[in-house]
Amino acid sequence: MEVLLFLWISLAALLTAGANKANHDDEGIVINMLNASRLRMFVDELPNMPKVQGYDIKNGVPISKKLKIGMFQKKWKFHRDLPPTTVFAYGTSKRTATVPGPTIEAIHRVKTYVTWQNHLPKKHILPWDPTIPTAIPVSKKGIPTVVHLHGGIDEPESDGNSNSWFTVGFKERGPTWTQKTYRYHNFQQPGNLWYHDHAMGLTRVNLLAGLLGSYIIRHPDLEGPLGLPSGDEFDRTVVIFDRSFRTDGSIYMNSTGNNPSIHPQWQPEYFGDTIIVNGKAWPRLTVRRRKYRFRILNASNARFFRIFLSNGMRFIHVASDSAYNERPVVLKKLLLAPSEIADVVVDFSTSASDEVILVNDAPYHSQPMIQLTKSTEKS
């Protein structure tokens, strides 16, 4: 018998489930906001993000590999009933680019070389505030980007300093830019990292547009004896973040700042009303009655998640971020801050039900139109 696992990250829903909301921007232009409660939950399958091997095999031995990963503008479907959304996405090509980006898998002490390539358009899809320190090309054309491997232990030249940004074809470069290809040594302990844009003043909007992805360092000799679930079906990355949308499917970010007379667009935090898991809003996953490993990353800008399983099952917490625990810890709830990763095992053979919902009950910074709700609606 199979357990149908519905991944539902409960959200702060709008007060009413009625019509979509029409707001106005600072120039009086009507913005048709999507009422997230109108999107039906659990209609999309949870994607398993594509994997890119950061190593080759020669004579049965892992060796270094050179990768080329680009940043592209493309359309992405976050939900069955939401129009395609314009996003920025990482991938080895525009066709294969995804949100979140592909999971890069590296081997302990085997170097991975990545040439990050900027293929983005001249104009950003989200508002950004030029009155704060920001990477702005002299030509005023192109979107600066640079990639930071979050949790990586590498030399400064490969760290993705916020002033090491570059535009399309490396035509313009930031003051600390040094090289096109980054070298990741992967000599740290096995574990979970993630990569994301890090350009000065544009990090938030570039991430909101989609520039983020998972990175795993594996150590087969060390991890094999642990007996943890393995393989693409049973060892899965789960990337969670929040977004708000307009009715046309575009990502919404308020273009009016908290202090518009000083900084016309800057806001300290971003909270979206739609929870995205591996690029889909409130997806579902069919699992077998056995153990699964979930590497859960909170890639939100400001939102915390406190997650639990609706049928009372427990998480077996085996690792945090890029390091294993000294011993497993059994938890009923997981608290995840932005950029935090929890590596857990869930044993679905212990489930007394055929359906289970992954729920979030964390409070967050209040918004005038939003209240925190926890629902048990099923599709």
Image (spheres, grey):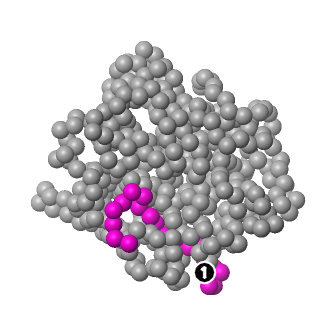
Query: Above or below — where is 350 with respect to 136?
Result: above
The answer to which of 290 and 79 lies nearer the viewer is 290
Query: Above or below — where is 222 with respect to 117?
Result: above
Residue at 49%, 41% (x, y): give it: 336
Locate residue 84 relative to residue 90 in the image: left or right.
right
Circle 1 residue: 137
Res 82 visible: no
Q: Quadrant of residue 328?
A: top left
Q: Position of residue 232 (x, y in %)?
A: 33, 42
Report the quarter where the C terminus lies.
Answer: top right
- Asked whether residue 151 is drawn in magenta, I would say yes
Q: Quadrant of residue 134?
A: bottom right
Crowding near pointer 1: few (<14 within 10 Å), some, many (20+)?
A: some
Q: Quadrant of residue 158?
A: bottom left
Residue at 77%, 61% (x, y): give it: 259
The answer to which of 283 and 326 lies nearer the viewer is 326
> Residue pushed farthest left?
59
Residue at 42%, 66% (x, y): give it: 69
- Asked whether residue 320 is drawn in magenta, I would say no
Report the quarter where the N terminus lies.
Answer: top left
Name which residue type carries label 1: Pro
Q: Position of residue 30 (x, y in %)?
A: 84, 55
Residue at 24%, 56% (x, y): give it: 108
Q: Give the mark count.
A: 1
For the record, the magenta segment spans 138-156
